[in-house]
Every structure is written in C-alpha cells, then in structure tokens.
Amino acid sequence: MALRFYNTLTRSMQEFRPITEGKVLIYVCGPTVYNLIHIGNARPMIVFDTLRRYLTYKGYDVNYVSNFTDVDDKIIKRANEEGVTASEISTKYIDETKKDMASLNVLPATTHPLATQEIPEMIELIRDLENRGFAYNVNGTVYFRTRKDKNYGKLSHKNLDELRSGFRDLKVSGEGQKEDPLDFVLWKPMKPGEPYWDSPWGKGRPGWHTECCVMSRKYLHSTTIDIHAGGEDLIFPHHENEIAQVECSTGKEFAHYWLHNAFLNINNEKMSKSLGNFLTVRDVEKKYDPQVLRFFMLSAHYRRVLNFTETSMEAAKASLGRIRTAVRTLNDRMENAVSQELTAEERARLGRDENGKPVPFEVKHDPETGAEILPDDMRLFRWQFEQAMDDDLNTADAESAIFNLVKFANVEVTEKSSRAFAGAVKKEITDLSDILGLIVDVQDEDLDAEIERKIEERQAARKAKDFAKADAIRDELLAEGIVLKDTRDGVRWERK
Ligand code: AMP
Ligand code: ZN
C-alpha cells in the first residue's frame, strides 16, 4: 500500500505525492506561549512528530517547521497581570515548552520561527494583498476582503451565507466598520501598553493568521508546501484565513495536504479552565513517565477524539511496561546466551536467507479463495506496522503490530536461543518503537526494579527478625552505590 492521508481540503483519502521527489515540506501550527502547555497541545506535537519520524523512516528528507506564537492578546494579558513584558512571558514559556517537548521525545523542528521576528515580511504580505484589492484599511485596522476571494471556505466546507447571517447578530465592537462579517483582521492598531511595530497603517501588530502564512513558506523555502497540520479547531477560521491570504497573494495553491488531529478530552469532557479539568504535561508527569503519555496519545487514530482517563493511562502504562519487559528479557537472553550465531532454524524465523540477508516480503494469494497468505516469520510485524502507518498514520494499529512482535519474542526467544537471534528480535522491537518515538530499552528502570526487589527482600528479612540477612542486603546495595533511608513513609533509596 502506498502512503495515504485523509486530506481535510478534499475530504478524502489521498495518496501522498510530494512536490519534490524524496522531500517533504511540513508546517505545524505551534502553541501560543503564555502558559505551560496542556496535554491537548501535546497531542498535535506528538502526532505530527510521529508523522515526521515515519516519513524520515520511509527515506524522505523532511523539513519540519513549527512556530511559536509569541505575540498575542493572551500573552499581553498575562504579562500585565505579572507586571513583566510580553517578551519575558513568551521567552519563559518557549523555554518551558521546549522542555516538555524533550520529555515527550518530540524532536526539535528543523526551524522554530517566532512571530515577532518576522514582522517585516508580514507587513509585505499585507501590502501585497492591499495592492491586489484583497485588503482594506479602516482607521489603522486592515481587513481581508473575503467576498473578493472566490475560493473562501474551501477548506472548512462551511456554508458562508449561514455564517454571515449568524455573524450579523453579533454585537462585537468594531464589527460595524467591516465590509463583510467574515472579513478578518490582518493588522490591528496598537492599544496603550501593548507591543507594537511601525507599519504603513500606523503602529500596531499583525493578526494571528498572517504569521503562519509567512513563517511556513519562508522556512520551507517554497510558495507551495506539502503538508500543513494542526488541531481541528484550527480549520476555521485560522487555516481558512491562511489559505485566503496566501492564495490571493501568490495565485498558487498554499498546501497540498491539510491534516488535522481531533481533540483530547478529559473524562469525556472538553478540557477547560472553568471546568477545572485542565491538565498540563507537567501535571501528568508528576504521576507518569512522559513516555506513558506519548504511548497513550498514539493509542488512538489521530482523527478520533481521545479520552484521557486514569484507566486509559493505567492501561497505557501497563502496555508500555509489557514492551519494556520483553526488551529487558531479550537483554538477559543476549547476555546469557549459550551460543553466538544464528541457527538455520532461527534464520528462517527471522525471514533471512543462508547469508543472513532478509528475504523480500511477499504477500501471496490463495488461488481458490483469493485470501491473503502472509509469510509466517518476524518480517510479518514490520509489514503490519507499515500497513498501519501508510493508512493515514494509524498509530493504534502500529502499536498492535509491536505487540504481535512482543508476543513473538516472548514465545520464540528462549534460554536456548543464540545471542544473534535474541539481538535481532530486540532490534526489531526497538526500531519499530523508535519510529513512534517510544523509548523501550530502559536500563535505569531495570536497575530500579532490581533495587526495589532487594529492598522488599530486606524488609521481609527484618520482619522475620533475620537481621543478619537484612544487614547483608543493605551492605550489598551500599557496595553498588545505593543508600537506604528509613523514613516514616517507608524505606527510601538514593544513589550516592
Ligand atoms: P493553541 O496554543 O491554542 O493555539 O494550540 C496549539 C495547538 O494545540 C493547536 O494545534 C490546537 O489545535 C491544539 N490543541 C489545543 N487544545 C487541544 C485539545 N484539547 N486536543 C487536541 N489538540 C488541541
Ligand atoms: Zn497557524
């Protein structure tokens, strides 16, 4: 199967064909930085980082750009509340967001542009739209003239007349000066105490939609890009308004594929501050390894609503633990293997020929029923994994393929296996997990589990009044650099 995506623009599944063979240009709308990111913000980060990893795995050279919106009403409000400048707030939260991304194993983008660093280009775009008759200035506010754009609404597939009549009832200040209720702001005039830039329309700052139009094409070095992505709340108006500006200015298509992730809910409710069910990535990290959160985010297809609950996180923790335990066992098997080289039988189980080279994976069909006949060896799981990922990034099924591989490992690799066999199976698990950004070969956790086990053994010895044994275990741990502390909450330990 060829790689295909569901394109919001065409509302259909489409085979992926990049503009330039072997290269992919992706832009993902990043967060507005006025707060620690919440777990909803983490969903597009994880999903599209996984898309990027998969495209790289498929051999594409990927240029991945994701911005930080560092000038915005919410940033200014927060700065005023704290009595600091807007740029102090945005700098702080860009830093914090990058830390969260790192802990979620989200790779840094090729470029992370900042809106405030690109203002001259935004002014240039707005000027161009004005010159073409697509923008007009009313007292220092510049609007986009939606009625002149015959394609306006093509992404969101909305009924614009209904939207217009809906807007007519809104008593929003400033609405009266617009030619059309759907016209949106390209440049807004400065209010006292706000950051501003000089422009042909006076002091002010650009509207949000204009930022992405400029930053995407500038850092992807192309008028048209391959993939533009973000959460589904961005389809309208944000992405619709981006398309309007770029396409009315360049006369060319802005992006070929528009990918949108569905929302993350908490206990079946929308996450919101007023409901008090708002969780930051940091909150979740107090209880869970961030890798558990990543595993959980990928356990559903990205276009399905995902529900964050304690139960689903516990399930994700157990599942990730299962993969990690399998890898740990494979490490043991490698260490204690009685032989080094693959046997003929093991080679066959891996799907390799006499020289150890993989045999090409071929799907045959039953001549009578036409049913698929799949090779029965380890190559099957990578095939299942790729089938899932090619099918609009079905990470849920890709995780299942890894589980099938884990089952294979648990059954087929025994204490009689060669070191090479255990090693090949382990590498397959770590390679596939790595495409999902999941870290499954965790030495420290191994050690931690072993320490916990010894502490329990010592506690049992103490209970049985076998103090000699308890002391011996304490000394043994001390020799490994582990110090035990008896506290009111039980035994704690730390590395010296
Ligand atoms: P914002 O900072 O609100 O512009 O959001 C940054 C990104 O996070 C955008 O792609 C949003 O669509 C996405 N996002 C915000 N909330 C959620 C949520 N609850 N679930 C999934 N994605 C979200
Ligand atoms: Zn954007």
Image: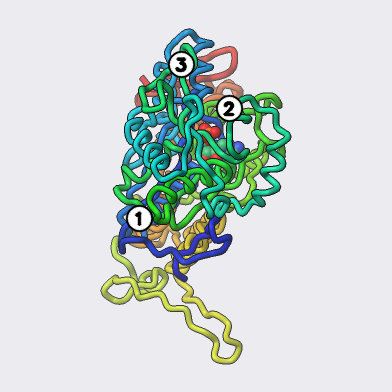
Going by the numbered disc 2, the residue's amino acid type is Ala
Disc 1 element: strand
Residue 442 visible here: no
Task: Quote the CA–CA distance across marks 2 and 3.
Answer: 65 Å
Marks 2,3: beta carbons within 8 A: no
Is 285 located above or below residue 12 in the figure? Answer: above
Name the residue tied to disc 2. Answer: 460
**Residue at the (56%, 28%) spot, across then down:** 280
**27 w.r.t. 409: above or below:** above
10 Å crowding of disc 3: few (<14), some (14-19), many (20+):
some
Q: Give the vertical position of 268 relative to 278 (above or below).
A: below
| Quarter of the figure that contains the C terminus | top left
- Residue 45 picture location, percent across and down: 47, 41
Amino acid on which disc 3 is placed: Glu
Residue 120, image x, y percentages: 32, 31
Picture mark count: 3
Q: Which residue is mark 1?
A: 24
Q: Is residue 144 left or right of residue 23?
A: right
Task: Name the residue type under label 1.
Answer: Val
Nearer-the-camera pick, 262 or 481: 262
**Residue at mark 3:** 194
Left or right, residue 27 beside residue 78: left
Disc 2 from disc 1: Cα separation? 58 Å
Q: Earlier in the sequence, mark 1 or mark 3?
A: 1
Pointer 1: residues within 10 angstroms few (<14), some, or many (20+)? many
